Image: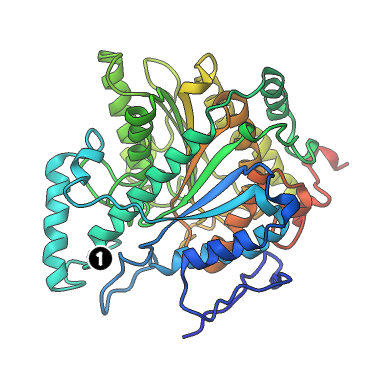
């Protein structure tokens, strides 16, 4: 069946690039990457790449079996990539697209996930997947399913994420000039609408971001328990690789998603506790999360889950900061929340990274788009959502944080986001913020509500 070409913008308008990518053919990330590269003119060829989207070639391996209903499906990757023709037009060569064929084989998984997941859990999951290969879908339960392609899918997702870490580490080897770091810190202190846009880089090393479009997601997975579509914890696996392969010792994991990254937080607490007992052991980690306190895993009012998703602790060898999404009636009220609670998450990450050598520091972002205002209502059962402009603002500020503290090194991993509108529009806004585009590109529909931002204090 031919797939629809464009993604719907926040206004409902259809994006129409001058030269269309042929979406009617079977989707292939490599073909899309070649098309995006072909859109770069000679004058842009030497422009610095600020962000590279890395896509797994085995994007469709993990799939629900016959009769298994799921929202976490292979088409999520294609839905997100629907924005890339528009990104290529607006951002040019500052955003690249790279396919990854790297896959972690079954016998390699235990070594790459050592210290993240218990060996017994990994072996049990692989054994259950082998049974599922004989009877696809028979092991589906709740929000999890196994399929014949699950081992291939999780291995490809991990391999793609490690490629993204390696690429960011390689591009972030040149130090950001001190003046540029100071400028980034100053702009992080400004109100969201006071910087239009944040200053761009003076050199190619000032932002070395990668965005791994991987699935299944990972931030709910703990040491030995899959949950919430997640089988392995992608963000912590990326942190482990950055530490063992590249000597990165200070890593800030920042999670924006409708749902609390409970698995990541549990793993970070455990790793930091080990670090306190043995400073030579694991890296030191910060975990900060922006989420809806009324959604999964807190939806059933489990006291332990709610408490965990509300902890703010920057002492006793731990670094945790949780922020709850707030309701907003208009964009001015949202900006008040953004400049208050939401930006505080980045301030705490900056405190954690301050004083750490930038060449040995990294930001990992668990990026979920399921709080986007265009997400399925069935996902946002509690009515909490974010305007499209949030993803532009937050990723613009994340770029400033990386320039100020990590020599620009930053790795994104896709978490939630399920509808075409949420994925395509959310990824576009995120990449526009990372590319340093102005507020006119805050959404696929243009500036959106950024055109004339208002604040409660501005009203008589």
Q: Quadrant of residue 120?
A: top left
Work out whether residue 75 or residue 102 is closer to the camera in this orientation and state it: 102
Q: Dot 1: what SS?
A: loop
Which residue bears the numbered disc 1?
149
Tell me which corner region of the image, top left, top right, bottom left or bottom right, holds residue 384.
bottom right
State whether residue 146 appears in this view.
yes
Crowd around label 1: few <14 · some 14–19 · many ≥20 (10 Å): many
Q: Residue 148 appears at what percent x and percent y?
A: 21, 68
Q: Which residue does the image show at 61% across and 61% down from the upper left?
A: 36
Asked whether, in this view, residue 224 is left or right of residue 296, the answer is: left
Q: Position of residue 266 (x, y in %)?
A: 31, 35
Examine the rendered structure and indicate whether residue 272 appears above or below residue 434.
above
Residue lying at 48% horizontally and 59% vertically, measured from the top left: 417
Q: Is residue 300 visible?
A: no
Q: Position of residue 37 (x, y in %)?
A: 61, 59
Q: Nearer the viewer, residue 387 or 56?
A: 56
Residue 445, quarter of the rendered image:
bottom right
Q: Residue at x 54, y 20 (%)?
A: 351
Nearer to the camera, 392 or 269: 392
Q: Is residue 117 left or right of residue 457?
A: left
Q: Residue at 35% across / 69% down in the picture?
A: 70
How many numbered discs, if any?
Answer: 1
Q: Residue 348, relative to residue 419: is it above or below?
A: above
Residue 81, above or below 345:
below
Q: Position of residue 216 (x, y in %)?
A: 35, 57
Residue furthest front as drawn: 42
**Left or right relative to 257: residue 340:** right
Q: Look at the image and tell me in which quarter the C terminus lies.
A: top right
In-front residue for pair 303/254: 254
Instruction: Indicate whether 355 appears above or below 321.
Output: above
């Amino acid at each position: 069946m031919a797939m629809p070409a464009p993604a719907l913008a926040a206004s409902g308008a259809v994006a129409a690039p001058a030269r269309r990518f042929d979406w009617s053919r079977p989707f292939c990330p490599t073909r899309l990457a070649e098309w995006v590269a072909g859109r770069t003119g000679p004058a842009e060829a030497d422009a610095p790449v600020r962000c590279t989207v890395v896509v797994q070639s085995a994007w469709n391996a993990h799939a629900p079996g016959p009769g298994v209903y799921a929202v976490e499906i292979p088409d999520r990757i294609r839905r997100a990539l629907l924005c890339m023709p528009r990104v290529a037009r607006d951002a040019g060569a500052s955003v690249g697209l790279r396919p990854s064929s790297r896959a972690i084989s079954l016998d390699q998984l235990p070594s790459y996930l050592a210290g993240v997941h218990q060996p017994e859990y990994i072996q049990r999951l692989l054994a259950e997947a082998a049974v599922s290969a004989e009877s696809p879908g028979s092991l589906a339960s709740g929000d999890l399913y196994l399929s014949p392609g699950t081992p291939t899918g999780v291995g490809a997702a991990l391999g793609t994420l490690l490629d993204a870490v390696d690429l960011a580490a390689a591009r972030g080897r040149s130090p950001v000039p001190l003046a540029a770091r100071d400028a980034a810190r100053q702009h992080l202190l400004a109100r969201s609408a006071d910087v239009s846009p944040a200053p761009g880089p003076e050199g190619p090393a000032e932002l070395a971001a990668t965005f791994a479009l991987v699935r299944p997601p990972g931030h709910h997975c703990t040491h030995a328990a899959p949950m919430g579509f997640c089988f392995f914890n992608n963000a912590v696996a990326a942190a482990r690789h950055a530490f063992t392969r590249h000597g990165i010792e200070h890593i800030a994991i920042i999670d924006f998603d409708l749902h609390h990254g409970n698995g990541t937080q549990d793993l970070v607490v455990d790793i930091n506790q080990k670090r306190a007992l043995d400073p030579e052991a694991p890296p030191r980690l910060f975990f900060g999360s922006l989420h809806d306190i009324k959604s999964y895993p807190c939806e059933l009012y489990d006291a332990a889950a709610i408490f965990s998703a509300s902890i703010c602790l920057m002492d006793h060898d731990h670094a945790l900061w949780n922020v709850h999404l707030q309701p907003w009636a208009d964009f001015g009220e949202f900006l008040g929340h953004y400049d208050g609670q939401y930006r505080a998450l980045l301030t705490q990450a900056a405190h954690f990274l301050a004083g750490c050598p930038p060449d040995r520091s990294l930001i990992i972002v668990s990026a979920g788009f399921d709080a986007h205002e265009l997400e399925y209502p069935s996902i946002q059962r509690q009515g909490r959502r974010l305007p499209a402009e949030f993803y532009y603002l937050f990723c613009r500020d994340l770029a400033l944080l990386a320039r100020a503290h990590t020599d620009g090194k930053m790795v994104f991993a896709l978490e939630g986001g399920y509808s075409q509108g949420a994925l395509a529009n959310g990824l576009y806004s995120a990449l526009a913020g990372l590319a340093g585009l102005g507020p006119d590109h805050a959404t696929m529909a243009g500036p959106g509500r950024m055109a004339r931002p208002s604040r409660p204090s501005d009203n008589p």
